[in-house]
Amino acid sequence: MAGLKILHVAPHLRQGGAERLLFELATHPSDGVTHHVALMQDEVFFDRASLHVEDLGFDLGHRFGALTHLPASRRRLRALIERLKPDVVQGWLYYGAFLSLAVGARAPLVWSIHNTTFPRLLANPLLHLVDRALATRSRAAPDAIVYCASSARAFHEARGYAAKRGLVIENGVDLALFRPDAARRVARRAGLGLSDDAFAVLLSARNDPQKDLPNCLDAFALFRSKAPQARLLLAGRGMDGSDVGLGAMIAARGLEAAVLTLGAVADMPGLLDAADAVLLGSRYGEAMPMALLEALAMGKPIAATRIGDVGRLPCPPEALAPPADPRSLASALSFARAGDPRWAASFAEARTHYGLDTMTRAYEALYRRLAAQEQVS
């Protein structure tokens, strides 16, 4: 088969796990494969110099108001498909998958889903509405539905998504980028003002109810009562000093001197080098979090809630806790600090199983299969 052209349709490329995966996939193609990215809202956190980006003209800041842009954006997407003539179109996350329905029969269609459970209906009614539409259309519209974890596939198929179209392609980490660097660790810790004896815990996530910051802060406060030199690094969208609510949560627990609010950080490998462990206390929604895969690839122990496929990660069971249980999560942090020798095998297995090359090959095999079927038909 000649060169392969893939068009990705996504809400945006803000900082986030699924967004990083799309960026990595689009910027690490094999020979003969090119990727184009159509964004509903033109926001790109990552280095866009190596991306082919098209703007579909949404304002996602107003959920229901964004619907008024839908007809024009569908027309833009169809015109883009006529111009690019992609071999495969891939709709990312719920809104990207929903907009990709405009593809019709113009090209094989893939949906990419990266979460498990939902927020409550009243917290995001539009998301629930789009989910119901996708479940109904899944019986005919996409040629394949890719889930990043088995738990995500089981959850959605139980909600009516077509089982015969589903498959799992697990997330992958750029192992050349996410590898420890001793000199970088020294420099980054100095830049953050971390002393040699400080045990730095990194929570890399957006400030969102899914990530359950109260649970994480409660767990860290309990952990710090036994490890007074512990410091918590908060990195991600909304994790900065301008958020009054976040500041109040930190102050209510007496953690002002122990928490660094860093906001969105582009150099995640460097920040991971500065950290001694990674914390993720999500309450719902996680499938296979990139933050945890990147931590393990960098040789950092984790303390996380057992959500989605997190329980399948190659880590000791003591590293995981039930959701909304700060005492158990604090215990997992203590275990991360203890330096259990089993972590060495965990790090090695994670690097073997969750590499970017493995993920990229799986996606490209799917693209080639669907493109070949299109040519035959």
Image: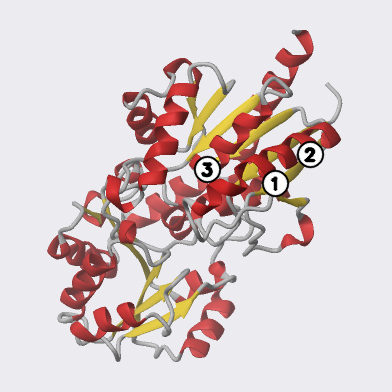
Disc 3 to disc 1, C-alpha distance: 12 Å
Disc 2 to disc 1, C-alpha distance: 9 Å
Name the residue located 42 percent from the left edge and 65 percent from the top edge.
206
SS category of the residue bearing label 1: strand
Name the residue located 26 percent from the left edge and 56 percent from the top edge.
319
Q: Nearer the viewer, residue 251 or 130?
A: 130
Q: Which of 308 and 180 is in front in this view?
A: 308
Residue 19 location in percent, x, y? Answer: 56, 52
Residue 127 location in percent, x, y? Answer: 41, 44
Could you tell me the amino acid type at mark 1? Ala
SS category of the residue bearing label 2: helix
Apparent side of residue 163 relative to residue 70 in the rendered image (left or right): left
Nearer-N-terminus badge (3/1):
1
Nearer-N-terminus badge (3/2):
2
Residue 55 location in percent, x, y? Answer: 72, 52
Could you tell me the amino acid type at mark 3? Tyr
Q: Residue 38 carries which label?
A: 1
Determine contact: label 2, label 1, CB under 8 Å. yes
Q: Quadrant of the image for the N terminus?
A: top right
Q: Quadrant of the image for the C terminus?
A: top right
Nearer-N-terminus badge (2/1):
1
Q: Which of 297 and 286 is in front in this view?
A: 286
Residue 329 location in percent, x, y? Answer: 20, 62
Could you tell me the amino acid type at mark 2? Leu
